[in-house]
Image (cartoon, rainbow, N blue to C red):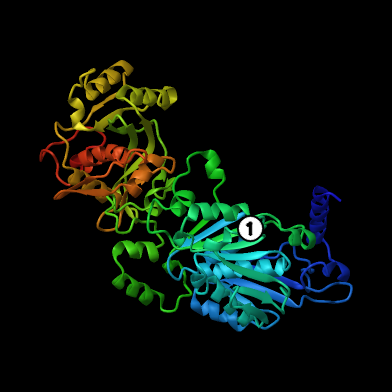
Amino acid sequence: MSRDALRARLQRAESAIATAYRSCSACDEWPAATASLIDGDSAQSMLGPNPWPAAGGACPTCGRRPSWALTVTVVDSIAEADVVRSASRPDEPHIAVTRHQADFLRCESKTAVFIGGLGAGKSVAAALWLLLRLVRYPRARHYVIGTTFAMLKAGTHITLRGLLDDLGWSYTYNRSTLTIAIESGPARGAEVLFWSSETFTTTKGLEVDSCVVEELAEWQSAESAFAYISGRLRQSPPASRHHPDIEPRLRVASNPPQSLSHFVYERFIAPPDDAEAAKARPTVFLTRTLDNPLIPQRDEYVAMLRAIMSPSVFRSQVLGEFVEIGAMRVYEQFTHRLHVRDKVEGIGAVRYDPTKPLAVGLDFGSRMGVAIMMQVHRLTAAVKGLQSVVVFVVDEIAVESSYTQKILDAFADRYRGSQQPASVYWYGDATGERAGSTGPADWEIVRRFLSARGYAGEVKKDSTNPLKVDRVAAMNHKLLDADGNVGLVVAPHCKTLIRDLATVKWKDVGTGRIIDHGKAGEAILSHASDGAGYFVAYEFGVMPRARGVVHDHPFGRWRER
């Protein structure tokens, strides 16, 4: 029988299993076990279609019952977890999980990533996911891969062994090879092999059915090693013989990397390059230490960590944020979780509205020219976590090896017809008033463009640029003020600006420092953030250019005072 025919037969069989009672002989084809995830009033099978009748849980022919029935329950407190655990028996164990862990367990994606702070529950979720795979597919190939063997012994390896001990299953542990062989329980005969990322790539022609990847952010050559492992994720010969319905799966459990140029951030978190890249992305679960209600004395634990960690390390290791640690980030208040959104509660979708005025922040450059499109939203009532005036970055145009007219032509092509803005205001580098040796000044080109196109609006800039430190301070304050309120949000598709805000750094030069624009051959940095910064500094800077001046246009800040 061909593989396709076999799969079709299995699909028909599974459909029948889901809707009918099964005989004793049919039950023998499945593990004598059930596993259910209970979340409120809903229940979900964690081992595929349940082979046991829902009414009474026994075979209608002979009365046989499953020998092992696991119940995984979502809880919101330690007290609820204690109640769940008190109902546990050897043949009917009960395990309490957090909501984030439950979402991870029920995920059906081929690859899923659980990234979080210390104590967020990553290792427990990964170990429980692997346990369910062992029960459902005991003769498949199951791997756990970590940075080194030493680190493996302190992660999922220890958590899995503790879980097996709690369940009362006997197993053999080989210290030299870090192999666990299950000898009793519904996963009897299953094996888990533990490998380091450094040695796993020496395997050739190996297929993997289930794989847990630990602390990917700590791996050497993480990108190439992860690509190699992903390429091994295909049905193994033992699985095809004994579990032809198996779908290979990969799960990643990791802390955030301590750099925003790390593969983990670029591959899983940063805006994708295009629609195809977005489709290829795994499912990602982000969580914080504070999201785990099962940590004893959690608030005291978090307070202790806050006291001993630097702010950036605390944000990474406890809040689960992606930050650049020890790298003199320019826009230090930017975090992907807070500032990259497609919708803001209390305002609406982060997208262009042609009925509202449009602000364009321009940065002229031969390596890259950039236009950042922004719209302002003034709140009529206070919204928790937001400043009273919120800037939406709704679009961007970034062209390498560009010139000013090329950027303006791209703007005109994008914002025409029904998409033409009601009015448009232009902000940017004051040095653009200087005429070049080969043609008119950049701002003169902009003014001619506005006149020819008939846009309502004007150029809004000073005769000199603000100090870079003041412009950066204005941006950081708009990103997040002293009360923790957000004032600038970026649409996810504005990847050039997001990359800038996340990665642009200061560079020491003599007795001072400048913004690092990146080296030749590397990503071109700072132009997008400069463009946005000119607008923010002009309209929301700490010091107004002329006290008492009333700005009679849609973004005037001081007329609100």
Residue 309's spot in the image, x, y percent?
31, 69
Vertical relation: 364 (above or below) 227? above
Residue 155's spot in the image, x, y percent?
51, 72
In terms of image quadrants, where is residue 451? top left
Q: Secondary structure at mark 1?
A: strand
Residue at image position (28%, 32%) is: 362
Q: Quadrant of the C terminus?
A: top left
Badge count: 1
Most foreground residue, 99 or 206: 206
Q: Is residue 344 left or right of residue 443?
A: right
Residue 48's spot in the image, x, y percent?
72, 62
Dot 1 corresponds to which residue? Answer: 249
In terms of image quadrants, where is residue 493? top left
Vertical relation: 266 (above or below) 37? above
Residue 376's spot in the image, x, y percent?
31, 40
Q: Is residue 50 left or right of residue 72?
A: right
Residue at image position (39%, 56%) is: 322
Can I make out residue 251 in this image?
yes
Circle 1: residue type:
Arg
- Local packing at callout 1 (Cα closer than 10 Å; few below 14, some 14-19, many 20+) is many
Most foreground residue, 41 or 96: 96
Vertical relation: 343 (above or below) 171? above
Most foreground residue, 142 or 541: 142
Residue at image position (39%, 49%) is: 346
Can I make out residue 76 in this image?
no
